[in-house]
Amino acid sequence: MEREVIQSVGFRNIKENGEITGFQFKIRLPYYRGVFLSQLRPGTLFIDGERIEKEDIIWNVKGEDFTVEQMKTDFQTHWDVTCPATLKVKKPGGLAQGYHDLKYGFCFTSSYMPPIIQAHLDPDKENMVFMPEFGHHVNERRMIIV
Amino acid sequence: MERRVKRGVAIYSYSGEYGRTMNLEDCFKDLRDMGATGIEILANSHIDSYPALTDEYVAEWMRLCTAYGVEPVEYGHWIDSRLYRNREISPQEAREKLVNDFQIAHRLGFRILRTKMGVINAELAPMENWREIIESVLPEAEKYDVVMCPEIHLTTVLSDRFVQDYVDFINETGTKNFGLNIDLSVFQNRFDVPGVVVFNPDCKHSQPEEIIPLLPYVKCIHAKFNKMDDDFNELTIPYPEILKILTDYGWEGYLLSEYEGEKKDVPGFVSHELRKQHVMMKRILGY
């Protein structure tokens, strides 16, 4: 795994039945401990400035696909710190060869932190105080489609 | 000299490298190399199949403990009370998760559990129904021979009401399966040292002697450190006073190093700081 949250391995177009239907990328969890999916607060993706809502992104954790709605109530599936999740986005034709700018926000709850600190968790905005052990909410990276 | 106070490492310390530049075996190698003999893992961080446990993991775990001569000391786990958006975790759900953790810890050879409970305020007071939840799993804790220990951590101070509540709970129930983990951050009295990561500059702190009446309940200590100087002194926590109390009062158990300073993600940085801290502890303890 790379130090960057958005990993260079895993960024590619998705081909289904010979047709390119979208693209995917992988992210690692920047927190020091794994989380159950219900703890996650997925945010918005910007690909080359184009906005993609969280509802249009499928998370694949440990080989299984989840919608944002399914993740809300999943408190059994655990996303580990050593295993990146794959995020899939529908986009007929996929992304063109060359550079692409990704910006993606997500965060998570922690029951051992004072509720007041977590009351206004926003995956698309940074916390008031940056805690290295929790990572940034919003991560950006320029990556290449081959 | 009798070595009652032992040195170990909470591999949380390596979290800036874990999964990138260090794996589980690298943690064992590093801590053994500085003469530490005990390890703390975090279930949710260091067991990839969590909340399940695979036979492969158990076999690898046993191999590592044997190969490096390291004993499993403390197993960190959580009662994540805020797993849901619209309600707290139910006592029954908490119970199921706890018993699962007891079983994992027992299989891996841990007796002490750092049971981190959900909190309800800025002093980190535990969720209101903690007694009900803990009491309901005492028979299973006894069966699997584990001791649940809430971690007393900054911004809490030892004189906070709920610390006494834990002690009262132990005395009232007579249980041997509940104790305390004191994180030395409760004694942190400097917040102005360059390189120290500070979130609560106005934080209260406890005096070293306040730990004395609690010692019979303390199963494990998190040797929190924020900043070592090059002469092997920790600059934010009064280690000499604290360790002297532990030896004077005959406390027996592990000091588990937990690095909470800067540059955790710089490869090798934490390993170097840990060595400095272990030099300090060896010098103070005399062994």
Image (cartoon, rainbow, N blue to C red):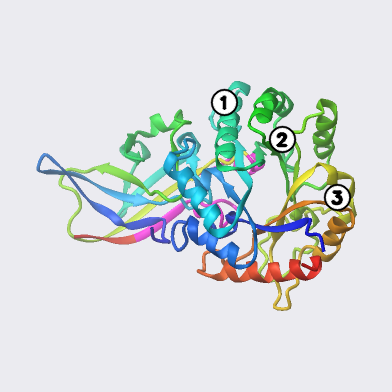
Residue B23 disc label: none
The number of callouts visible is 3
The answer to whether residue A8 is left or right of residue B155 is left
Give, as a three-letter code, the residue at label 3.
Ile
Mark 2 neighbour density, 10 Å: few (under 14) some (14–19) many (20 or more): some
What is the secondary structure assignment of the residue under circle 2?
Answer: loop
Pointer 3 residue:
B211
Q: Earlier in the sequence, mark 2 or mark 3?
A: 2
What is the secondary structure assignment of the residue under circle 1?
Answer: helix
Classify the position of the C terminus of chain B by image quarter.
bottom right
Q: Is residue B285 visible?
A: yes
Q: Is residue B234 visible?
A: no
Pointer 1 residue:
B96
Tell me the chief SS of the magenta region: loop
Give, as a three-letter code, the residue at label 2.
Pro
Pointer 2 residue:
B126
Range covered by the magenta-colored residues: A112-141
| Residue closer to the observer: A61 or B57 | B57
Whether A118 is among the magenta residues is yes
What distance separates the C-alpha of mark 2 from that of mark 3? 20 Å
Who's the residue at 80% across and 63% down the image?
B239
Who's the residue at 66% across and 57% down the image?
B8
Chain of the residue under label 3: B
What is the secondary structure assignment of the residue under circle 3?
Answer: helix
Who's the residue at 60% across and 23% down the image?
B90
Of the residues tagged 1 and 2, which is closer to the observer?
1
What distance separates the C-alpha of mark 1 from that of mark 2? 19 Å
In the rendering, at what x and y percent does residue B198 appear?
68, 60
Residue A62, quarter of picture: top left
In the rendering, at what x and y percent does residue A137 appear?
48, 51
Chain of the residue under label 1: B
